[in-house]
Image: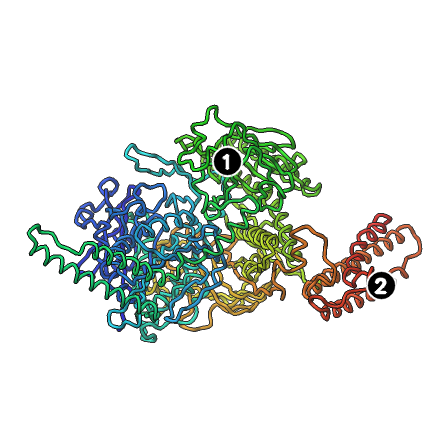
Amino acid sequence: MSVSIKVAVRCRPFTIEDSLGVHLLQNGEEEGEINLLNSNYSTARFAFSWAWWSAFGWQRRCKSDEGIAESMPMITQPDCYEACGKKIKAELLDGNAVVLFAYGLSGSGKTFTVFGPDAIDSPDAWFKHSEPTDWWGIFPRLAYELFQEKEDGWKITMKYFQNVVDIVRDLMSPVGQENNYKKGMRKDADGFTDIEWCSSAVLNSWDDLRTKFMEANARKAISPTQFNHQSTRGHCILTLEIEKPHPDDPSSKQRGRVYVCDLAGTEPAGDIYYANYRTVTHPDGSVDHDLIGPHSDQRKTKELQDQGKKINLSLTEMAQFFMKMAEAIKAKKLKPGKTIPGCNSYFLCKYLKDTMLQARTYLFCAIRPEVTYHKYTFSTLGFAKNASVIKLQPKKATVAASPAERRLMAELEQMKLMVQSLTEQNKQLQVGSPTGEGGGGDEMAALQEMLRAKQEQLQNVLTGGEEGGGDAMLQRQQQEYAQRGIALTHFEKDTKLPYFINLDEDPYRDGRIMYILKQASTTFGAKGDISPLSLSVVRGHCVVEAEGMDFAAFEGAEEPPLASMDPQPTFTLVGGRGETFHNGKAIADGVRQELKPWDRVVMGGELLLFHAPGMEGEDVTDKPTAEDAIEEYQEGLRQLRLSGGGGVDEEERAKLEEARKAFEAQKAEFERQKQEMLAQGASSEEIKREEQKAKMIAALDKEIMDLMVRTKEAKDLVNRMSRSNLDFEVKLQKSDHPLGIDKVKVMVRKTEADGRTEDICIDTFEFTKGLATMGDEVRNLRTAIENDREYTVDESNDPINLMFGTTTEVAVATQFLDYFMYMLAPEEDDRHLDLRTPTAPFRTLGKLTVDWEPLAGPPDDEGNVPEGPPLNKDGEELIVQEAEDLIGQPWTYRVTIRQATGLPVIAEKSYCAFKFMNETYYTTTVEQSSSSPEYATGDAADYTAIIHIPCITQEHVDFLQQETGMEIHVFAAPVVNLPKQPISSTSALVRAAITGNEMPLIKDLSAEDAMTLQAEVIQLRKEKEALQRQVVELMTEVARLKGEPLPGEAVEEGKAEGAEEEAKAAEGADEAAAAPAEGGAAPEAGEDSKVVKELKEAQETDAELNEPAAAS
């Protein structure tokens, strides 16, 4: 039996003073209706299962249609659950999969509907209450009832993870496990999608669920935007699986599962900014977050927008999937439960597309009541309308019960019958007894104890004797960290001892590890009392002294002993051989600095916060955020490096100094221009615009300086991971910013053994994310090497994949729009636009074929496009001879981007995007492994953008006539080819690079390692040959200028020597490939192997090359 996706649309309270924009009606049990008010949209009525008006307090801000607002019944959280929650629970317990989608703008109330308040600092957060409250959303009520009804033989497990761009983060992992979203994504035997490596927890009670969720939810990636002070930056998915005995078949169990999908906000990335909020705590304990405005650091907004564009791709793909599915179903081309090809490029569709088609699926859309948000409301309702048409083919899942489970269930049933029989006997004895007392009390107690033991035995069989996946790995990591004096917060969060804890802007990485002070003097550094994992930490890095501490008082203490010690202990940070900062200031060797609670300390790049339980007080308003601490450290680091410290070489210091001087010059120039504008009577808005531009330029310079340091760190990491053929450089790219501010990118260059190079420019947030992952992997390798354990970096975390596996802009074309002001189609030659690289030197690539077709009007409610020529507002043919003729008229075009040719990469997947006025349009993402991807092939299912403007204004005309045209951006993820040898702790090259030990001899190298070294030798020889040629050419030019005989013979000698050495190198490569991997024939005693000889020769090359260069 087929069913449709059930859709509920809920309207949140007003946030601004505005006219009422929606009218919600519930005409029957599952007959909801939404009407747009005060709207210019042609489609203004939408029908769904439920329409819920929850705009509490509308009277304070609603400025029109008060009668309509008054007529709509107010829907509460319990009302929502009564409408659909009971039905969801019944379907779940019957063995169905149930998918719950939450869709809408950030801050529109989608999370509130499915969960309720979930902020960790909210006293109303649902997981802080053991009994239902009026604030609880659909899922907490559902889960609470499930645990109330839980019986013997039930097993309830939970997973909770977050997708951020192309990464999946296991929110239930206390050590922060994350991987590429494709890793471990599998379909189980029932055809439902799962991510195998994500940990799951068996839940024995409602309190188990609350505790697990609270811990996991604190790890999700959030950022403050103007829409929400805790906007989720990605899609969060919680799964709850219930296995229970089948009522009709003792040999099997029913397996129901619910997927709660709280999607990222749907607002366009360009519309958001990183916001500042003021937290206000009221006497009753409630907390408000008041929006102050945009954050002063423009880089944060830029990073948020860049990340948002990538997140929006998966939402756009899901919207396209629903639209194409709806079109196919309306055309009767698709059977229930079947899907269309494509729409499988990003996490959301890849994970949920097939699952929701064979599940009972509910879509909860959240909208805002104000007319101001009509654009977003209409988009959300369009998404919901397409979804509501889709036909599903739900199927139930079962799993076989093991013999042990069947035996124990039978024994339990037998015991329950015995208890029931004994209870009845006691009742009869009580009736016949003069004292009214029964007998058999001891027997009953013994039987009940046996029953409890049997129930516990069954539970152990169901769970496999474990609390959840990943425990063994966690215990191993705890033991390995303990050897370095490092504690995992998961195990030591309640310690009473003073400690440092790691700080990170990313909540997922924040607070993972602790350095606990257990003695009067603690040395940090290699071979010290505490040896941090950072590769920048050196022996004797620094020392922390604790004076006046009675460490014996901490044994078994329930309260922090520090609070009662008199006098209170003092803590001192003593500078050592390593780079150490205290509250943003560098601490030199031997310098002593007093430590106070919440001081920030940086050791070799590791940012730490000092805690002294019992000395911190109850007021936490002064507690610094990770964001503040990082900004403080970065400023201190810049000052140190500009002053000549920080391990920066002269070339890099010169670049930093040059950047600083340029920044100061820009500031001076801006001040001069500002004074000049004031003298000329410029308006306050013009001056404000220039001030904003100056701030953005300052942020740009700051970002460049920070990235220059980070690219050096990235180079060090790839060298340690045997990927030294990667190089990094900071680049500027032109953008469509209205103030003309360039974008900062990081160019990553991969050099092959034959000298060929491949470049890609990636967003800074992608680079930073990859850098963090590389740091994690180097630490994993180091820990494995130290513990003589094998560890192999997953392919998705190979530096080449991290950098080249991202989707980034690879080409751009300019479309001039003045032609379309006259409602004409372009000439054949004008369909093919020139493609160029997006960064300097803007080299010409291939062509981008784009079709613009003028239409008679927009599509109707069924998606049908009217035929005929373009029509004016009176329904007659629209003829435009001058720009003025278009003003006041409708304008409709269908835009189809067909193909890009000559891209600089072979694209594994690719799409195009362009911004028309203030709206961004995307093509379908195609996966063709081609440098000439086709985005439209003529198939009716191909995506085309229809741009409709109901009434053209002068602003629209100016846009069409702009001399710079409109840019169409081509994005691609290159095909990535990894080296055959993975990055592993068993690799001799990796071990040598990470431990700092000498390079091993050939007999200790695998064949792959030997070939890698040989490739580097070949590359060095080619560079040597090229340099020799340059030297000869310079000497020739000098001789010509002096009138001396030209050294022609030297040129021929250089060529001959180069050819001879290239032949030698090729011969060496063949020998390395044939060499045995381990324990092969060793060279004669005292004789270097061929690879080692050539390495030594390559090292001597530098000295040889310096001599003739100096002479010339």
Residue that label 2 marks: 1057
437 displayed left or right of 186: left
Please name whichever residue, 774 or 672, is drawn nearer the observer in this view of the structure: 774
Reply above or below: 193 against 60: below
Amino acid type, callout 2: Glu
Residue 568, numbered label: none
Q: Is residue 905 above or below residue 1110?
A: below
Q: CA distance from mark 1 to mark 2?
A: 62 Å
- Amino acid type, callout 1: Phe
Q: Are marks 1 and 2 in contact (CB under 8 Å)?
A: no
* In the foreground, 38 or 795: 795
Instruction: Tell me residue 1039's x, y (percent).
Output: 89, 53
The residue lying at 7 percent from left, 56 percent from top is 431
Could you tell me which secondary element the residue under label 2 belongs to? helix
Q: In this view of the protein, can residue 693 be seen by the observer?
A: yes
Give residue 992's position: percent from left, percent from top: 68, 54
Q: Is residue 494 left or right of residue 580?
A: left
The quadrant of the picture occupied by the N terminus is bottom left
Query: Which residue, given by chain and number where applicable, does mark 1 sit on?
Result: 610
Quarter location, residue 943? bottom left
Q: Nearer the viewer, mark 1 or mark 2?
A: 1
Label 2 CA crowd tier, 10 Å (few <14, some 14–19, many 20+) = some
